[in-house]
Image (tube, rainbow, N blue to C red):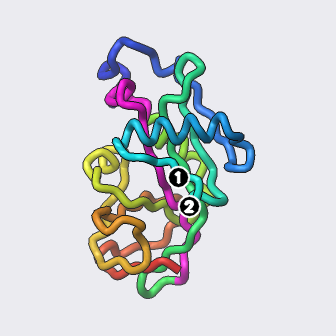
Amino acid sequence: MGDAGLETAFRRDQVVLAVVPLGSLGPVRKAAIVRVCSDALGADCGSLFDYLTASTHVLAALDGRLVGHACWSSRQLQPVGLPPLRTAWVDAVSVGPTHQRRGIGSLVMRRLADETADFELRALGTERMAYFARLGWEPWEGPTRGVHHDPLDSLMILRTATSPHLDRAAPISGV
């Protein structure tokens, strides 16, 4: 979405993005992330950091307050016929409800893509396929095994410069 499509409540240059490894977050930032994710998803995300180990977080702040988040951790996914691929597994993509539909999520996801350029693949599970497709993510059409946390999610991928040729109709598994 171009700048002309943004609401006038803020300009993109007012959003401050930070990339922070899990070990440097601290309790205040962790609580803010849980709050943003819980508000955005309408569910209690209090256990978020129980499974987001060894993760790196992209934080979006507006006027010093956390308004958006996404993170990744390193996993391996293996499409049939290929060796395991070093994959940036993306999780907890959230923007607080009062800041949604203003481009913050897109800023966060573009920064995440830049930061994970050295991976062979990026992947996530989602029910919001249209949103991620607008950002260049592609649906995985083949069977998945051991890939998703949530059976309602669909697997989507974002290729990197080092991604091999991928047959999105082939089976893929988590290694």
Name the residue located 58 percent from the left edge and 53 percent from the top edge.
49
Q: 125 and 25: which one is in front?
A: 25
Q: Residue furthest right?
A: 24
Q: Is residue 1 magenta?
A: no
Q: Amino acid at mark 1?
A: Leu
Q: Residue furthest top?
A: 8
Name the residue located 68 percent from the left edge and 49 percent from the top edge.
22
- The quadrant of the image that shows the N terminus is top left
Q: Amino acid at mark 2?
A: Tyr
Give the Cα distance between marks 2 and 1. Answer: 6 Å
Which residue lies under the disc numbered 2?
A: 51
Name the residue located 43 percent from the left edge and 30 percent from the top edge.
104
Q: Secondary structure at mark 2?
A: helix
Q: 158 and 10: which one is in front?
A: 10
Q: Is residue 16 above or below residue 136?
A: above
Where is residue 48? Give x, y as percent: 53, 52
The magenta stretch is 83-105
Q: Quadrant of residue 131?
A: top left
Name the residue located 37 percent from the left edge and 54 percent from the top edge.
137
> Residue 48 bears which disc, if any?
1
Q: Secondary structure at mark 1?
A: helix
Q: Residue furthest bottom?
A: 81
Q: Is residue 90 magenta?
A: yes
Horizontal side of 35 relative to 25 (left or right) equals left
Residues under numbered marks 2 and 1 in contact, where contact means CB atoms less than 8 Å apart: yes
Q: 133 and 126: which one is in front?
A: 126
Label 2 crowding class (10 Å Cα cut-off): few <14, some 14-19, many 20+? few
Where is residue 96? Give x, y as percent: 41, 31
Q: Is residue 89 above or below residue 32?
A: below
